[in-house]
Image (cartoon, grey):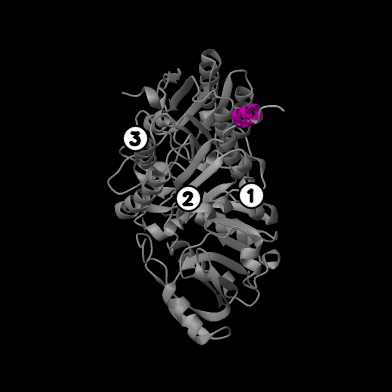
Amino acid sequence: MRNPLVYLFLIVILIGCKNNTEKKLPRIAIAGLGIESSTFSPALTHEEAFHPKIGDSIFNRYPFMEADSSLRQRAEWVPTLVGKSLPGGTVTREAYESLVGKTLTMLEENMPYDGLFFDIHGAMSVVGLDDPEGDLIKRIREVVGTDVLISTSMDLHGNVSKRLAQHSDLITCYRMAPHEDATESRKRAVENLVTRLENGKGKPKYKAWIPVPILLPGEKTSTRVEPGKSLYAKVPEVEQKEGVIDAAIWIGYAWADEPRNHAVVMVTGDDQQQITKGAEKLANSFWDVREKFEFVAPTKSYEEALELALASNKKPFMLSDMGDNPTAGGAGDVTWTLTELLKREEFHAADGKSLIYASIPGPKLVEEAIKVGVGGEVSAPVGAEIDDRYAPPLMLTGEVTAIKQGDVHAETEVVVKVDNAHVIVTKKRKPYHRKSDFTDLGLIPSETDIIVVKIGYLVPELYNMRGDWIMALTPGGVDQDLERLGHKRIMRPMFPYDKDMERPDLSARLIKASDELD
């Protein structure tokens, strides 16, 4: 009879072999804060605007991270806090410190980590603090350590300071404006992170960072048209080179006055020659076409834009009220444009033009509308509670035709009919980007002569439903006339402020890895 101890010994060996062949899943945290903050707007952004998600609810932000997705199965995920706000004014220091404090506490409680997905926008301004994203990632590093692999995902209208570049191991941004590839870009950031952890290569050997002294608004740098279209087409060409992990061009954010506000090119990977060559190719390509950037649509003064809209028979004629665009950081409650529109007889005459205006915050009017109900008459002030620099609050009088409650941003929406004009009034500011934003309020965009939206370039759904379109140079915290805003702290010389500046040094700066910093 054989010795049972031999069998026991063999079983132990087999179990040990099995355990050794099983791959241990990398442990990856998720964290981030995102907002575009105009320092030229008097508005302030508070904590609730970020609608912070905590724990597993964060997965709902990422379609590629569903429970049965391959990415979800390739790692042990530790979602902590991700907060994303509509663009707005400067974030209060209290809100920032509260959100950061919660993030750091959750990260510390759930350590250790192999990696971290850092999901940010890149254009957050905070009262009394330059470069908040650079500050946040540095403070995260102080908790999780410098060995952890951090992959940063950003909007191409974000800013990449040297500090952010240093503490980010992998970094990428959108390649389309409008941002139709936002989800794809975040997925790329996560896939790069997981792959580098799985193959054991970890931090890239090289990170090339090139500041490009150009500061242009997004409405002039859309990838729908040239030269942005061809410029961004060069990004995947660089990325596909052997030894390159990712390549990216950041336009930067034009409506904040900080030293980090300018364009940047970054390329990461393991082949120094390909990294530096690729980064310099993109930076020089950007500089060479700097004078060719123009507004993505015809752009006129408000007066000229309105005359064109009134003369057109194409429905709907979309007019972008750009200066107070809440999706770029405007307060959203400037009443100047609406005040001027309602002075026009065409919107009051029986045979005049129909108008939809989207939108103006007016919590007092919303309160009155709820009291009188649909079909009732209201008369109450709207707008200019935050930004009254261009026009005072507007007394709006008309019939309530719709009330809708429960919107994540507006909370309550009311439509007020003033003769031929339908004015959307909200409890809190909200951008109007979809056909359903109008039809859910009983409005019919296709049968409306003129629709005025507080936006810059039209997002895809509005672009596709337009009869015609023009962008109006209206006043506000995100005025498209950047020189009129009066930047004082940006790096100089800077194009287009210094049009005759000499060609800058666009050689690649090799950035130290996070674990090599002094």
Q: Position of residue 128 (x, y in %)?
A: 27, 46
Q: Please provide the residue range marked out in magenta.
A: 5-21
- Mark 3, Cα crowd under 10 Å, few <14 / some 14-19 / many 20+, is some
> Mark 2: which secondary structure?
loop
Compared across the picture, whether 198 is left or right of 46 comes to right
Quadrant occupied by the N terminus: top right
Q: Position of residue 395 (x, y in %)?
A: 42, 75
Q: Which mark is residue 328?
A: 2
Residue type, label 3: Pro
Q: Position of residue 248 (x, y in %)?
A: 54, 30
Residue 432, placed above or below residue 154: below
- Residue bearing mark 1: 67
Q: Position of residue 4 (x, y in %)?
A: 65, 31
Residue 12, placed above or below residue 446: above
Residue in the image at 66% along x and 66% along y: 448
How far apart are the alpha carbons under marks 3 and 1? 42 Å
**Which comes before the other along the chain, label 2 or label 1?**
1
Marks 2, 1: nearer the viewer: 1
Residue type, label 1: Ala
How far apart are the alpha carbons under marks 3 and 2? 19 Å
Q: Which mark is residue 259?
A: 3
